[in-house]
Image: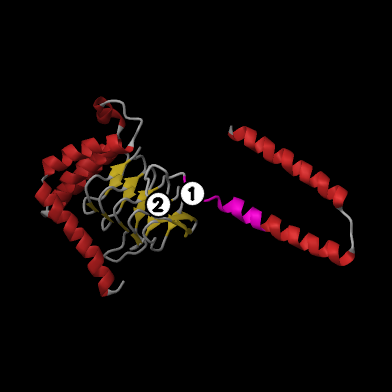
Amino acid sequence: MNEEEKDIHQQIKERILKEQKEFGLWNQIKEDFSVPKLNDPALDSSFELFFNYPGVWAIIAHRITNRLYNKGYKKIARALTGIVSLFSKTDVHPAATIGRRVFIDHAIGVVIGATTVIEEDVLIYQCVTLGGVSLDKGKRHPTVRSNAVIGSGAKVLGNIIIDKNSKVGANSVVVCDVPKNSTAVGVPAKVIKKEEKNCKLAHDDLPDINKEMFKYIIERIHILEEAVKEEDGIDVSDKDKKLEDDYTRFINAMNSIKK
């Protein structure tokens, strides 16, 4: 990582910490309690926050442990994190930098490493890992910028940037930067979609890679068949019609399942 990239990560971290200090711990906790109402339509009452939203408690606990850690009370911060992990089923390192209105939905199995930096309004689903791939003491975990969405089971590894308004598909493994307004899926993840619109809850709006590939193969085979028929004068119209009928029945059957 060059000096310019170091400056970007450090600037983001310093800005978040400065804003947190100005905003105040109590105000931040109150804001964290209000975040599920914006991100989870399943929330029916504030009562549920105390028993059904471990991600909220993981974030609130981190607000406290992060301040203790940064003030030098590292052992106390680590001990409190361990206790919170037993109840929230998450592992959020107290040294991680987390901005305002970050929501961890369902939360179970989420791991956030020590040098991770998360900006504002990020949505993270269960079983996500923001991990490192190095034993260096320096920056070795991801930076997730504002309004990004990390789908369930995704692994974002190394000192990379998930830029603003981007999405990482469920169970993807991301090992390189994702540009802003992009969608990355796969193992390893590839950027397959770029768009300006941003709807965080539409994390199912992902291109069907297999469908596109099969469509390409079918069209390619069709072109080759036409070339062979023209070259050799072969008449396969009867077999071709039967195959088309079989394919139509299959598509109709699949469409009926979707309904």
Seen at 18% across and 50% down, the residue is 66
Seen at 21% across and 64% down, the residue is 10
- Binning the other alpha carbons within 10 Å of mark 2 as few (below 14), some (14 to 19) or many (20 upward) gives many
Q: Mark 2 = which residue?
A: 167
Up/down of 42 relative to 143, above or below: above
Q: Amino acid at mark 1?
A: Leu
In screen coordinates, is 241 left or right of 155? right
Q: Quadrant of residue 82?
A: top left
Q: Quadrant of the C terminus?
A: top right
Q: Earlier in the sequence, mark 1 or mark 2?
A: 2
Q: SS class of the residue under badge 1?
A: loop
Q: On residue 227, which mark appears?
A: none
Q: CA distance from mark 1 to mark 2?
A: 9 Å
Q: Amino acid at mark 2?
A: Lys
Q: Position of residue 143 (x, y in %)?
A: 30, 58
Does the image show residue 185? yes
Q: Quadrant of the N terminus?
A: bottom left
In screen coordinates, is 251 left or right of 190? right
The foreground one among 249 and 9 is 249
The foreground one among 124 and 237 is 237
Q: Position of residue 191 (x, y in %)?
A: 46, 59
Check contact, mark 1 vs mark 2: CB within 8 A: yes
Q: On residue 206, which mark appears?
A: 1
Q: Which residues are magenta?
A: 205-216
Does the image show residue 86? no
The foreground one among 62 and 89 is 62
Q: Position of residue 227 (x, y in %)?
A: 80, 64
Seen at 75% across and 58% down, the residue is 222
